[in-house]
């Protein structure tokens, strides 16, 4: 499935240097964070994040030849789960702006290619994906959007709209725009303490509103972690519709 330079067929090449992007992600996700990230996620979710990610990758019910992009892939937990769920005839590319996170992702062993889709990882900013238009069947972004600078979130989702084929589907996990009232302040304090006030701004206007503005259609929405997070399913409409003006 891979070409001679190790890229999947529908990828163009990307630079091998660190990216300088706005927002908390690339600043905080250095080597040490990358090494402990999965253990940290296990700790704060009482060991449930890995199985949650696998379950959601299966629930997507990918087709065997699907091509998927996992944006803000971090250490590749979801990328690998997607590869297993799609199977050996498909392909998955993980995209992240942190070389350290990508190094950690590459170091994790993958299932033999007989069982999983071909996986590759590329360094790129979410708002400039090095993938051709309409080349992807599935797009995911778990816990990435709040790390992107507020002004770059809509451009990132418009990139998702560009690379997804008409009818292509996606799944975003991020901080909910309707956190239950008793959890609102604890969640706000915790997120701002860990990632700064820009991260908290994801709750306004929130993932569903941003998806609409990016020309993507919400097809489902579920509360996760007592409603602190939300999982939003979407698709790219079959018919091209004019994009609403960018008002965020
Ligand atoms: C909290 S981690 C989530 C990783 C993974 N999706 C998961 O669920 O475990 C967020 C990731 O987003 C990446 N990121 C932040 N801003 C980005 C941007 N503008 N473009 C691409 N990746 C970005 C960070 O480097 C980090 O690896």
Image (cartoon, grey):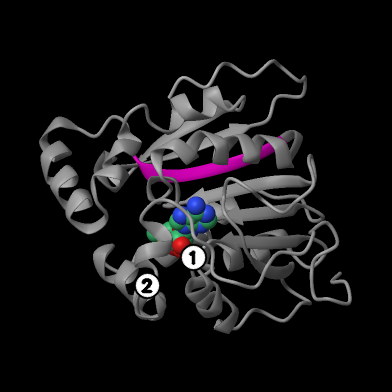
Q: Residue at x 52, y 22 (%)?
A: 246
Secondary structure category for the residue under label 1? loop
Span colored in magenta:
168-175
Residue to which mark 1 is pinned: 74
Magenta stretch, main secondary structure, is strand
Q: Is residue 223 above or below residue 86?
A: above
Which quarter shows the N terminus?
A: bottom right
| Foreground of the two, 115 or 79 | 79
Residue ID at (56%, 17%): 245
Judge by depth and name the residue closer to the eye, 86 or 37. Answer: 37
Assign a secondary structure to mark 2.
Answer: helix
Is disc 2 surrounded by few (<14), some (14 to 19) or many (20+) residues within 10 Å? some
| Marker count (numbered) | 2
Badge 1 local density, few (<14 within 10 Å), some, or many (20+)? Answer: many
The residue at which mark 2 appears reads as: 37
Residue 133, can we see it? yes
Quarter of the figure with residue 134: top right
The answer to whether residue 171 is magenta is yes
Q: Are marks 1 and 2 in contact (CB under 8 Å)?
A: yes
């Amino acid at each position: 499935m891979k070409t001679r330079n190790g890229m999947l067929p529908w990828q163009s090449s990307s630079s091998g240097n660190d990216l300088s992007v706005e927002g908390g992600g690339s600043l905080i996700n250095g080597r040490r964070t990358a090494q402990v990230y999965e253990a940290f996620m296990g700790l704060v979710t009482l060991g449930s994040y890995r199985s949650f990610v696998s379950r959601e990758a299966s629930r997507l019910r990918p087709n065997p030849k699907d091509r998927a992009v996992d944006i803000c892939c971090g250490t590749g937990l979801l990328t690998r789960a997607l590869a297993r769920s799609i199977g050996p005839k498909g392909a998955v590319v993980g995209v992240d702006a942190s070389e350290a996170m990508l190094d950690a992702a590459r170091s994790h062993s993958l299932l033999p290619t007989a069982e999983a889709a071909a996986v590759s990882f590329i360094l790129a900013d979410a708002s400039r994906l090095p993938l051709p238009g309409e080349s992807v069947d599935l797009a995911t972004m778990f816990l990435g959007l709040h790390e992107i600078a507020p002004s770059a979130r809509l451009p990132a989702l418009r990139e998702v709209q560009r690379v997804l084929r008409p009818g292509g589907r996606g799944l975003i996990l991020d901080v909910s725009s309707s956190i239950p009232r008793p959890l609102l302040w604890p969640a706000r304090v915790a997120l701002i303490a860990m990632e700064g006030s820009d991260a908290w701004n994801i709750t306004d206007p929130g993932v569903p509103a941003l998806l609409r503005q990016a020309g993507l259609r919400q097809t489902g929405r579920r509360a996760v972690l007592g409603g602190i997070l939300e999982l939003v399913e979407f698709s790219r409409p079959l018919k091209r519709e004019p994009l609403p003006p960018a008002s965020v």
